[in-house]
Amino acid sequence: MIPSARPSYSVMIVDDSTAARAFLRQIVESDSRLQVMATANDAQSAARKMKTALPDVMLLDIDLPGINGLSFLRKIMSQRPLPVVICSSHAVEGSELVQIARAAGAHDVVEKPIMADAADYERARRRICAALRAGAAGPLARQSETGAPHVPTKHSPDVIMPMPAVLRPAPATEPIVCLGASTGGTEALRQVLTALPAEAPAIVIVQHMPEGFTTAFARRMDSLSKIQVIEAEGGERLRQGCAVIAPGNRHLILRRIGSEYRTDLVDGPPISRHRPSVDLLFRSVAIAAGDNALGILMTGMGDDGALSLGDMRKAGAKTAVQDEQSCVVFGMPRAALEFGSASQMLPVEAIAAFIMSFAQRHRQGLLR
């Protein structure tokens, strides 16, 4: 059998500097799997070219004349989502710009290269090309002209944690809240976490982010919130007043030991094309916590979490989704509603109060 050729991805470069566009073209075209289909010097020019043909992935600068890169990114995500890699001289890892760009829907954020020698060039080339390939091959990838999507195999949670044929009711415990989010989720989670009081129930979170970025995100949320926010290392006991965020590139699941819940980090293939996966977290919560839990699926592309939010509902948990008006992208919540996994929609500004109301009602039930 003749092996199939590696996929080739089309790239649009948007940068107001003629020299930068030429240099970035050189970098992109150094990779045989990437092809520059178009360049543009501002957002308006890029938008006109996108009416004729869409790229598989866009390399976008922030400092553009007229509509800046972040505003253009938000417009793309609200009107015709596609993978966007921000390339900016301001994109220092851990900076607020990186967080803002990810909240607006950027697949990745890379620092614009400043060449000092051949080693600098090679590092920048590898970083930029890897980010573009990953974006083009990810969940936002559009279909090619042949109709074959450039996406990885979609595994269900069953490959790691099958749903039991008979689900035993969970014993009554303290309330557990689990949140899942993707595109636009960092800002939505900020609104929720910073609005919670110190006595908020234990929370577990999956936010689609690459490895390394979740550490900075957890630290930032911890500095802004009344509750403690940490990145999971595995084995944490869930407790009131603390939120645990899945690390990039590791699945986070929940296990019950007696009346307590502990986190566990597991490897394995991407579930619903993501690692960490909301679907796998929600599946584990359905099995471990049952009707002691609340699950909320928030803004994001695709359908990760939609299936297993239904598992939680069948197990007696309360379920909800973020409403369309407050989502950057309504994909994941819409899929959950279509599957019948959620019983209600909430604007993002109402989610914190909903969490506290759930926790209060649940604790009152424990006292009866």
Image: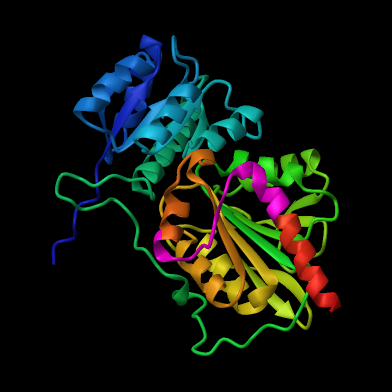
Q: Nearer the viewer, residue 156 or 317?
A: 317
Picture coordinates of residue 31, whole percent (x, y): 31, 37
Residue 360 visible in rendering: yes
Magenta stretch containing residue 304, yes or no?
Answer: no
- Identify the residue at image location x=24%, y=43%: 8
Label tally = 0
Q: Is residue 99 above or below residue 218?
A: above
Q: Is residue 190 above or below residue 360?
A: above
Q: Is residue 140 above or below residue 111?
A: below
- Most extreme residue toward the front is 368
- Identify the residue at image location x=62%, y=71%: 317
Q: Nearer the viewer, residue 363 or 7?
A: 363
Left or right of 142, for residue 257: right
Picture coordinates of residue 55, whole percent (x, y): 28, 34
Residue 359: quarter of image: bottom right
Magenta stretch containing residue 349, yes or no?
Answer: yes
Residue 44: quarter of image: top left
- Identify the residue at image location x=81%, y=64%: 239
Q: Nearer the viewer, residue 77 or 26?
A: 77
Picture coordinates of residue 227, whole percent (x, y): 81, 50
Quadrant containing the C terminus in the rendered view: bottom right
Region in magenta: 338-354
- Identify the residue at image location x=43%, y=53%: 334
Picture coordinates of residue 190, whole percent (x, y): 67, 41
Quadrant containing the N terminus in the rendered view: bottom left
Left or right of 365, for residue 311: left
Residue 270 visible in rendering: no
Which colouring convention does the figure follow?
rainbow
Q: Is residue 222 above or below residue 366?
A: above
Q: Nearer the viewer, residue 194 or 141?
A: 194
